[in-house]
């Protein structure tokens, strides 16, 4: 399950709880937000203009947020010698304002494998700096140019970030040209294996690694939308953060008369790892209300469990049962 399950066994139950059937309360942190079955981060590489003109409107229509990996030097030179049009900072700023992630793909797309420490640092820092200035948000993730890595590059790129892209599923592209059927199978596989997948797409109708028929991508996104109750689509940063915080949070559960008290414990830095976690409660007694730090928390009922979101840094959560 990849989560922390706290099972209240009869032997642990204090006498003051004798009026609550606590022997079968289960509480755990959901693998993904809203206890969805799998997760997808759609990520688009190299800042191609079509990511703004074609991809962004489709994503907005469906309410999906995605990640765009940018090389500052290539944006500044408007594609440079490649002759392939790129997005402008203003276009990316608009996307960022609407919840999309504009993040670091190295200043000049220089491969970081087998490079001097100072070169790696410069490539990453220059790009952090221009994205922070132009977009107004420091990148908290990183994508390796050409997907080439070594330990040194990973160590330097990971510092102060919630994650870096180490695995990707290519959608589109000459070598791995995607088909409707292939993408459907991939989605079924994700649902079955409950994984978080990170995609990689370059060109859409031209440029490089583009689709033979871009409707394959639009139809796929519609298909995912139709399964939105089971699939969490969000930026690389959002899902990387959730997964990291989930893996590093322990629920300390204490009991009082009619309440159940949960204290989330995590040693992560809340300035970098900002996220709520979804908790799942399975209990055969009605919950009156749930409160964290004096604030009432909304509950969602789903089948035989109750879902609610907590802030892992805000301390004590009180679940009060109906008499
Ligand atoms: Zn690239």
Image (spheres, rainbow, N blue to C red):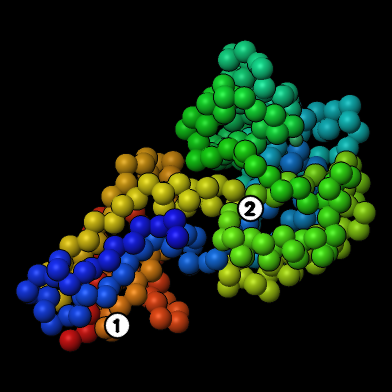
214 with respect to 200 (left or right)? right
Q: Which quarter of the image is occupied by the C terminus?
A: bottom left
- The residue tagged 1 is 284
Label 1 near ligand 1 (CB < 8 Å): no
Q: Which of the 4 quarters of the picture holds residue 228?
A: bottom right
Q: Residue at x 78, y 51 (%)?
A: 171
- Residue 122 rendering spot, x and y as whole percentages: 61, 19
- Residue 277 rendering spot, x and y as whole percentages: 41, 59
| Label 2 environment density (alpha carbons within 10 Å; few <14, some 14–19, many ≥20) | some
- Residue 179 rendering spot, x and y as whole percentages: 85, 60
270 with respect to 58 (left or right)? left
Ligand 1's image quarter is: top right
The CA span between labels 2 and 1 is 35 Å
Q: Residue at x 77, y 30 (%)?
A: 74
User: What is the number of the mark on residue 92?
Assistant: none
- The residue tagged 2 is 197
110 with respect to 120 (left or right)? right
Q: Which quarter of the image is occupied by the N terminus?
A: bottom left
- Residue 209 rendering spot, x and y as whole percentages: 86, 44
Which residue is outermost to the front? 11
Question: Which of the pair 97/3 is nearer the observer?
Answer: 3
The number of discs equals 2
Helix or strand or loop: what does disc 2 sit on? Answer: strand
């Amino acid at each position: 399950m990849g989560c922390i399950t706290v099972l209240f066994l009869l032997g642990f139950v204090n006498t003051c709880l004798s009026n609550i059937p606590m022997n079968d309360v289960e509480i755990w942190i959901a693998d993904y937000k809203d206890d969805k079955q799998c997760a997808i981060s759609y990520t688009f590489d190299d800042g191609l203009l079509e990511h703004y003109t074609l991809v962004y409107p489709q994503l907005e229509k469906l309410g999906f947020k995605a990640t765009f990996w940018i090389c500052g030097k290539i944006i500044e030179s408007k594609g440079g010698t490649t002759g392939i049009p790129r997005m402008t900072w203003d276009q990316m700023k608009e996307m960022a304002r609407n919840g999309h992630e504009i993040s670091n793909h190295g200043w000049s797309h220089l491969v970081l494998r087998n490079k001097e420490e100072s070169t790696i640092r410069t490539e990453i820092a220059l790009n952090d700096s221009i994205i922070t200035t132009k977009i107004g948000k420091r990148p908290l993730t990183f994508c390796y140019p050409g997907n080439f890595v070594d330990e040194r590059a990973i160590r330097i790129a990971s510092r102060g970030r919630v994650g870096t892209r180490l695995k990707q599923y290519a959608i589109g592209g000459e070598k791995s040209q995607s088909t409707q059927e292939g993408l459907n199978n991939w989605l079924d596989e994700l649902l079955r294996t409950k994984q978080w997948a990170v995609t990689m797409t370059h060109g859409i109708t031209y440029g490089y690694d583009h689709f033979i028929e871009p409707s394959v991508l639009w139809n796929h996104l519609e298909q995912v939308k139709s399964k939105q109750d089971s699939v969490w689509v969000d930026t690389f940063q959002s899902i990387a953060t959730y997964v990291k915080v989930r893996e590093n949070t322990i629920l300390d559960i204490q009991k009082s008369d009619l309440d159940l008290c949960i204290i989330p414990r995590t040693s992560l830095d809340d300035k970098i790892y900002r996220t709520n976690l979804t908790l799942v409660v399975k209990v055969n007694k009605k919950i009156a209300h749930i409160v964290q730090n004096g604030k009432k928390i909304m509950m969602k009922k789903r089948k035989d469990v109750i879902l609610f979101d907590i802030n892992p840094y805000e301390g004590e959560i009180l679940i009060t049962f109906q008499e």
